[in-house]
Amino acid sequence: MGCLARGPRIGDLGDAAQPDLAAARRRRVERRGGRQMSDLIWLAVAFLGALILSLDIALAMLFATTVILLFGGIVPLHLIAEKAVSQVKLFPLLAIPGFILMGELMNMVGLTRSLGELARKIVGRWRGGMGAATVVACMFFGGMTGSGLAETVAIGMLMIPMLTRHGYPKEFSAAMIAAGGSLGPIIPPSIPMVIYASIAPTVSVSALFIGGIVPGILIGLSFLVIVVWRTRAFATADMPLDGEEEVGFGRTVLDAVPALVAPAIVLGGVLGGVVTVTEASVLAATYVALFGFVTGRLRLGDLGGAAMNTATATGTFGFIIAAAGPFSFFLALFDAPGLVGTVLTDFSGGNTVLLMLVLTAILIGLGCLVEATSLVIILAPILAATASAAGIDQLHMALVSICALMLGLFTPPVGTNLFAITGIAQVPIERISREIIPFAFAAAAVVALMAAFPQIVLFLPQLVR
C-alpha cells in the first residue's frame, strides 16, 4: 500500500488543510502516471474484498476509503466525515423522506387498493386480465412512491391473494410483481432520479422526471406482453368469482381519483415550475394525510408509525449516500471517470451507439450484483463524465443508466424486490427466479432500444421544453 499516490485534486477540505493539500497536489503531479492506476486498483480491491466478505455496500465503501486513508497517507483522516456530511447536505435529497411518507400514508388510507381496482377495470377482462391489471397497478403505483421496494411490498400484499384465488401460480404472481416493482424508480417521481441529479448536476430532476415517463410505460407494456403470453398456460379465471363484488367503472374511477391527485401534485408542481421537487413531495404527503383525516381513514396516532417507517427507510438511503461521499471523492481523485470514458470511447471507436449498448450491458450486469440505488450514487459522476467525453446527451445517459440499473431490483442474486416478494408469497426464491427470466429479457430489450435510439427517451423532454 506504500505505493499509493499522495494528492487530492480539490481544495475544499478547510483552510487549515490547504498548505498540506497544496504540497500533496504537487507530489501527485510529480508521481501521477502509473501510480494513479495503482491507487484506483487498491481502492477497487478493498471495496470488492469487503463485498466478498458480505459487508453491506455502505460499509464496503467506508472500509475501502479508510484503507486508502490509513495506508496511503493521501489526505487528512477527517476527510471521511467531511465528505460524508457534504454529500447528504444536498437540498434535493430532502425529497426522499417526502416521497416515502407519501407512499406510507397512501397504504394506510387505502388508496393503493383503489388503484388496483382501477387497473382491474381497465384491463381485467383481457385474457390474463388479472395479471395485466397487476402490471398496470404497478405502473400507477410507480407514480406514487419512487421506490421499487415499497411498491413491491404494497402491490404484493394487495394482489397476490387475489391472483391466487383466480388461478395464477404463486411463483408467477411473485415474479410479475417483483418485476413490476422496478417501475417505481423509473416512472416519476423517482428516488434514484433525485439522487442522480443531486450528485451529478449535469441534468435536472424535472428533466429526468419527464424523461422517465416513456421508458416506464414501454417497460410496463413489455411486461404486459409477457403476462398475456405466459397466462395462456394457466387455468386462470379472470372474471369476478363468486362472492366478489363487482363495482361499476364510473364508481371505480371516482374512488381512484384521490389516489391520482398525489402524483398530479408532484408532476404538475415540478414541471410547471411552481414548486421544487422537495416542496412537491411534502405537499403530496400533506395532501394524502389530510385526505385520510377528512375521510376518517387515518388517525393522529397512525402518523407515528408512518413517521417511524419513513425515518427507517430514509436512514438507510442516507447512510449509503453519506458513505458514497468519500468513496466518490477518491474515484474522482484517481480519475476513474476519465479512465472509464477513455476505455469505453476507445473500445467503441467513437461509435456512440455501440458505446451506449456496451455500457448498458455492463450496468445491467452490475445491477444484478450490487444494490441498484447504491450504484446510482457511486456511478453518477462517472457516467456524467463519460457522456461528456463521448459527446452523448447527458439526459440520455442518465435515463438509460437508471433504467438499466433498476433491472437489478428483481434479478438474483441481490434483487431487493425479489427477496421482499419471496417473504410475501411464501415461495422459494429459486422458483420465482425461473419465472423472472422472461421479464428480465423483455426489460433488457427495451433498455437496449433506448440506448440505441436516443429519441425514444428524449422526445418528450424536448417537446415539453
Image (spheres, helix red, strand yellow):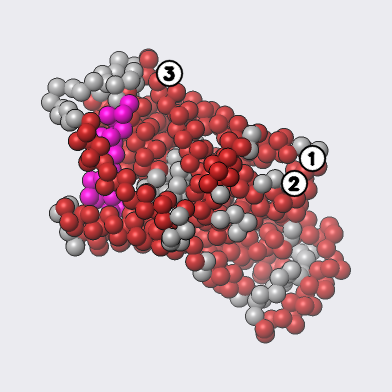
Counting residues from the start of the chain, the first of labels 2 and 1 encountered is 1
User: Which residue, as the protein is rendered here, is positioned at the far left?
Assistant: 243
Q: Is residue 387 visible?
A: yes
Task: Identify the image quadrant of residue 229.
Answer: top left
Q: Residue at x 78, y 56 (%)?
A: 37
Secondary structure under tag 2 reads: helix
Q: In terms of secondary structure, what is the magenta stretch mainly?
A: helix
Question: As shown in the figure, which amino acid type bears the numbered disc 3?
Answer: Trp
User: Which residue, as the protein is rendered here, is positioned at the far right?
Assistant: 30
Task: Kindly identify which residue carries mark 1.
Answer: 350
Counting residues from the start of the chain, the first of labels 3 and 1 encountered is 3
Q: Residues within 10 Å of mark 2 (few under 14, many from 20)?
A: some
Task: Kindly identify which residue carries mark 2.
Answer: 390
Task: Identify the image quadrant of residue 228.
Answer: top left
Question: As shown in the figure, which amino acid type bears the numbered disc 2?
Answer: Ala
Residue 229 is tagged as 3
Residue stretch rendered in magenta on the structure: 103-123
**Eyeballing the image, is 370 above or below 159?**
below
Question: As shown in the figure, which amino acid type bears the numbered disc 1?
Answer: Gly
Secondary structure under tag 3 reads: helix
